[in-house]
């Protein structure tokens, strides 16, 4: 148990608070049209070739980065509990959904073939805190740009939520 806790402490953990109700923030994580607007870092775009946000559903996506090219990823939603929690896998793939070695996809040699992402949504006084955990070394995620990419995506989501606020 101690070894597991030590590993988890080294993984990606971040929290971000939005000035928006939990249902709106959760919807932004599950609505395909909204995901397409924010689920890529600054200067990048995302294409969802497939997207089925429900327990057992899957996705195949590509983040296009003008500097580094395309990054394909597939995954399965292992838990979707509205508006509380989403869990899914992220697996390095090609455009056809075939699993590929991270190095052959142009990624860091230590990047795992598969990571798990869990996202929780808690509301307090109309504000929602998203807590994200990804099963990859936070140090490696910072070195490769994955960690700052999460932060950038959450910043874009915040702008989207503020834009659509009535």
Image: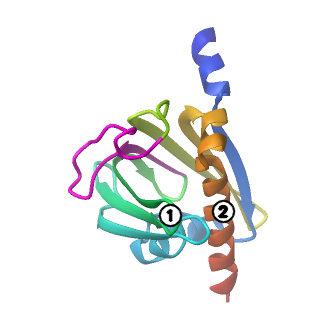
Q: Residue at point 67% right, 26% down? A: 9
Residue for point 38% across, 62% down: 62
Q: Is residue 164 above or below residue 100?
A: below
155 over 149 or under it: above or below: below
Q: Which residues are magenta?
A: 85-107
Mark 1 residue element: helix
Could you say which is closer to the camera, residue 84 or residue 129? 129
Answer whether residue 95 is magenta in the image: yes
Q: Few, some or many C-alpha atoms within 10 Å of disc 1 (few <14, some 14-19, many ≥20)? A: some
- Give how far across and how far down residue 95 sits, in percent: 26, 58
Describe the element under mark 2 as helix, strand or loop.
helix
Please state which of residues 111 and 80 is positioned toward the viewer in this rendering. Answer: 111
In the displayed structure image, the side of residue 42 where residue 118 appears, left or right = left
Residue situated furthest top in the rendering: 2
Give residue 95's mark: none
Q: Residue furthest bottom?
A: 166
Could you tell me which residue is drawn at 48 percent across and 58 percent down?
82
Q: Main secondary structure of the magenta part?
A: loop
Say which quadrant the C terminus sits in.
bottom right
Label 1, on which residue? 29
Could you say where residue 94 lies in the image, as x and y percent from the top left? 27, 52
Residue 10 location, x and y as percent? 66, 27
The x and y percentages for residue 40 are 53, 65
Instruction: Say few, some or many: other residues with alpha carbon within 10 Å of mark 2 (under 14 / 14 to 19 / 20 or more).
Output: some
- Of residues 140 and 50, the one nearer the viewer is 140
Q: Is residue 14 visible?
A: yes
Magenta includes 73? no
Q: Which residue is mark 2?
A: 152
């Amino acid at each position: 148990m101690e070894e597991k806790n030590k590993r988890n402490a080294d993984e990606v953990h971040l929290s971000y608070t939005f000035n928006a109700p939990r249902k709106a923030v959760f919807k932004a994580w599950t609505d395909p049209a909204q995901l397409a607007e924010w689920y890529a870092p600054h200067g990048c775009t995302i294409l969802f070739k497939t997207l089925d946000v429900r327990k057992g559903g899957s996705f195949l996506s590509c983040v296009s980065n003008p500097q580094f090219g395309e990054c394909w990823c597939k995954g399965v939603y292992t838990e979707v509990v509205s508006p509380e929690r989403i869990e899914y896998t992220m697996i390095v793939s090609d455009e056809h959904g075939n699993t590929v070695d991270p190095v052959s996809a142009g990624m860091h040699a230590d990047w795992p073939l598969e990571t798990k992402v869990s996202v929780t949504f808690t509301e307090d006084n109309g504000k929602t805190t998203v807590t994200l955990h990804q099963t990859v070394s936070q140090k490696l995620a910072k070195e490769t740009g994955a960690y700052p990419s999460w932060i950038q995506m959450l910043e874009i989501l915040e702008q989207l939520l503020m834009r659509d606020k009535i």
